[in-house]
Amino acid sequence: MGVQPSGDVSKNYLKDTNVLFLGGLMVAVAIEHVNLHKRIALRVLLVVGSQPRWLMLGFMIATAFLSMWISNTATTAMMTPIGAAVLAELFKEEDEQAAKDDVMLKVRGESNGGLELETMDVEGQTHVYDAVEGENATKEQQQEDEPVEHGKQSSRRQSMQKGLMLCIAYAANIGGTATLTGTSPNLIVSEQMEILFPNSPGVDFATWFFFAAPGMVITLILAWLWLSTIFVGCRCAEDCACCGQKKTSGAEDVIRKAYDELGPISFAEGGVIFHFLLLVLLWFFRDLKFVDLGNRQAGWAYYFIPGYVTDATPAIIVSFALFMFPSKPPRFLCCRSKDVYHVGSDEEKPGPVPGLLDWPTVHTKMPWHIVLLLGGGFALADGVEKSGLSEWLGDQFSKLAGIEAWTICLIVCIGVAVFTEVASNVTATSIFIPILAKMAEGVCVNPYYLMVPAGIAASFAFMLPVATPPNAIVFSYGGIKVSDMVKTGFLMNLTSLLVLMVSINTLGVPIYNLNTFPDWAVCRSGALGAANSTINPTVMTTTL
């Protein structure tokens, strides 16, 4: 196509943002390697209880928190089997009764005598129920003695299964928006801001978190209220602790048993927790933007040459440390066991111990395809900018300079959310962000005002299975129809976009200084005064 030479395209696959993402993924691999993510999820479920409504909230909290730090796909793949096991125990009695009723109907000849449709249970196993007349009593007895998962599911079980699986998928999508490394579109916004506006303050971990995390929490709560109302309903008596205790004690036993099997926190888990907290603190305190020190950064980066230290620096340092930090207590001096030389105690002999991470583990568990996908997104965005497409579209959008800024932002977010329902969020962000950067200059609006909400809106894909990997995982697990996702996802999209619009016009104003047009961008329409006056959070909120 003659847009860029191969050398320029290749540079997009190993930029500073790619290294930041790679370091974050290595920490996530360490968390998965020591089973820390499973311990966190089960602990949250034990805290919230096993009532259906609160169980959904527990799964959403655990999934959203894990999705902030590890990939949405890995989080969903881990939580769905846990949810399936809990559901099997929660509705064990109802499923047994439904299976008995189904067998009685067949014995009495009330079935149609043909072959019924195949049904998929939550364990992913397909069972065909034969209703052929003349079956002997031995086979009928075998059907009655089959375990619960081979029986017919109750209607409440099917409804709860849909709700819980959608809770996991939606929480994974929502949770990834809270942190800069939570999902790829966030990193694309940060990278494009540095490329297109090199003199801008950029987007770092701390500012993104302070802006996106409150909106994530609000969206998560609204999603829980919406999903629990649809799939659980208003059953106050069943949600009561005394009335529902007997029914849900089995589910709580399953969670408790799984948690007890993990045992106490191991030395390796403690080491991963230490490195994880260290990385988060280094991200937050690298550059305290609310402290003005002129050209110097007001954080630990103050002691380094300006511009030489970014969020990728602590990410890669902590990742390397995980390879060197021992996964077991050191075997020397006072740490050695007294029976070190006894027979059968080879593990206690002096010598090196494995690290928290090793390369075979990283090679196996690292989602390399996501790293390449992110690099491809950067290459696509660079091509949009270098080809002149973003410049041309930005000039065309300059005709919208008379429209209020919040209206433009709302239209942009809706467009991105709709586009990402049928395309990957990386593709959507890579195409739209360079265009929105030029569009912001064309209508004389602060580029943060359009680029940051568009990046977050790319994760609000709740209506179709192909929209995001979490949606596809829960859909393939069985029990969910496309109509179920469209029905629940449509209102979820509207609610998420509403929360996003309120956030950018309230929290976004002081964090990104949206009330003024920055001097590091160029106003191309001459409508600077009008544009600045339109970004008024009070007017926008009252209009909505």
Image (cartoon, helix red, strand yellow):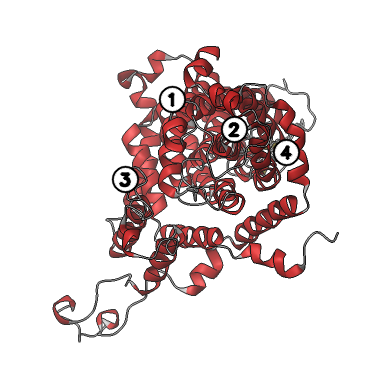
First of labels 3, 2 by sequence position: 3
Depth check, front residue: 172 or 503? 503
Work out how far the residue at label 4 is from the one at label 2, CA to CA, in angstroms: 12 Å
Q: Earlier in the sequence, mark 4 or mark 2?
A: 4
* Amino acid type assigned to the residue bearing label 2 in the image: Val
Q: Residue at x 61, y 28 (%)?
A: 409
Q: In the image, which is nearer the foreground, mark 2 or mark 1?
A: 2
Which element is circle 3 on?
loop
Residue 394 numbered tag: 4
Q: Are marks 1 and 4 in contact (CB under 8 Å)?
A: no
Label 1 vs label 4: CA separation? 47 Å
Amino acid on which the number 3 mark rests in the picture: Val
Per the model, the C-alpha gap separating discs 3 and 2 is 25 Å
Q: Which residue is drawn at the image coordinates 46% and 34% (left, top)?
A: 216
Marks 4/3: CA–CA distance: 34 Å
Evaluate if marks 4 and 2 touch, with contact meaning CB atoms under 8 Å apart.
Answer: no
Q: Dot 4 lies on which element?
A: helix
Residue 48 visible in the picture = yes
Q: Which residue is mark 2?
A: 445
Q: Position of residue 225 (x, y in %)?
A: 47, 22
Q: Earlier in the sequence, mark 2 or mark 1?
A: 1
Q: Are marks 2 and 1 in contact (CB under 8 Å)?
A: no
Q: Residue type at mark 1?
A: Arg
Quadrant in which the C terminus appears = top right
Is disc 2 placed on a helix, strand or loop? loop
- Residue bearing mark 3: 291
Secondary element type, mark 1: helix
Please name the residue shown 64% across and 28% down the image: 527
